[in-house]
C-alpha cells in the first residue's frame, strides 16, 4: 500500500491516518471502526500488445463507491467513496469501509479506460472480503501507431482517456 513517505506526508500525518476512523464521535450517524469492513485483492491488466500476458496493476487508483457504470464514479457527488492506490504488485486493500452496497472501480496509469468489477460488494461490520485476482481487459483495437501523452487521467497526459 502507499505509505506516508510516498505521498510527502509527515510521520504525524501517518499517525492521524492510521487512527481514523475516530471512535470518540458520539453521533449515531457516525460509523465507528468496529462497524466497518474491508476489501482486498490484486489487480492485473491484460497486455494485448504483448501476447495477452498479464501485468500487475501497479499504483492503480482504486475506489469503492455506489454502484454505477464504469468511470461514472468520477461524477457521483452523493454517497461515500473509499479510495486507495495499489502497490507495485497491484495488490489493494481498502479498510474502514462503511456498510452498504458498493462497486469497485479502478484506473491504471498507462492504460486506456476504466475498470469496474462486475459484482456488487456488500460490506457488513467487521467483514473482510478478499476479491482474489481481478482482471482488467482495457479496450484494444490493435497496435498503437501513434499516441499523444500517457493515459493517466491528468492534464499532463491525456485527460480525455480517463
Image (cartoon, rainbow, N blue to C red):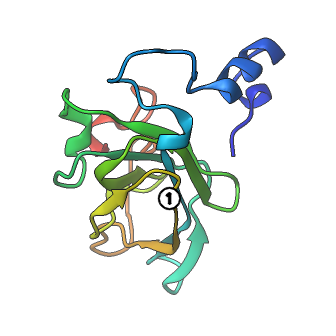
Q: Position of 95 compared to 15: left or right?
A: left
- Outermost residue on the bottom side: it is 51
Q: Position of 81 compared to 13: left or right?
A: left
Q: Position of residue 9 (x, y in %)?
A: 73, 17
Q: What kind of element bears circle 1?
A: loop
Q: Quadrant of residue 31?
A: top left
Q: Where is residue 83 in the image (x, y as percent from the top left)?
A: 47, 38
Taking depth in this image into account, of 30 and 86 the one nearest to the observer is 30
> In the image, what residue occupies the spot 67% across and 52% down?
87
**Which residue bears the numbered disc 1?**
127
- Outermost residue on the right side: it is 11
> In the image, what residue occupies the spot 35% across and 66% down?
138
Q: In which quarter of the image is the C terminus?
A: top left
Q: Where is residue 134 in the image (x, y as percent from the top left)?
A: 47, 72
Taking depth in this image into account, of 9 and 97 the one nearest to the observer is 97
Instruction: Report if residue 109 is visible in the image.
Output: no
Question: Total label count?
Answer: 1
Q: Position of 126 compared to 160: left or right?
A: right
Instruction: Report if residue 151 is visible in the image.
Output: yes
**In the displayed structure, would residue 47 be above or below residue 122?**
below
**In the displayed structure, would residue 119 be above or below residue 108?**
below
> In the image, what residue occupies the spot 35% across and 23% down?
28
Taking depth in this image into account, of 60 and 76 the one nearest to the observer is 76
**In the displayed structure, would residue 86 be above or below residue 115?**
above
Q: Position of residue 46 (x, y in %)?
A: 47, 75
Amino acid at each position: 500500500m502507499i505509505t506516508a513517505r510516498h505521498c510527502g506526508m509527515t510521520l504525524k500525518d501517518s499517525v492521524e491516518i492510521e487512527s481514523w476512523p475516530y471512535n470518540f464521535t458520539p453521533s449515531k450517524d457516525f460509523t465507528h471502526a468496529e462497524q466497518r469492513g474491508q476489501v482486498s485483492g490484486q489487480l492485473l491488466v491484460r497486455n494485448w500488445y504483448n501476447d495477452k500476458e498479464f501485468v500487475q496493476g501497479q499504483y492503480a487508483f482504486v475506489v469503492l463507491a455506489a454502484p454505477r457504470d464504469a468511470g461514472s464514479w468520477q461524477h457521483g457527488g452523493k454517497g461515500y467513496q473509499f479510495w486507495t492506490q495499489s502497490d507495485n504488485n497491484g495488490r489493494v486493500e481498502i479498510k474502514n469501509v462503511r456498510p452498504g452496497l458498493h462497486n469497485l472501480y479502478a484506473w491504471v496509469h498507462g492504460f486506456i479506460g476504466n475498470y469496474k468489477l462486475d459484482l456488487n460488494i456488500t460490506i457488513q461490520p467487521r467483514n473482510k472480503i478478499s476479491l482474489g485476482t481481478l482482471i482488467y481487459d482495457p479496450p484494444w483495437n490493435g497496435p498503437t501507431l501513434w499516441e499523444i501523452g500517457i493515459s493517466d487521467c491528468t492534464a499532463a497526459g491525456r485527460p480525455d482517456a480517463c
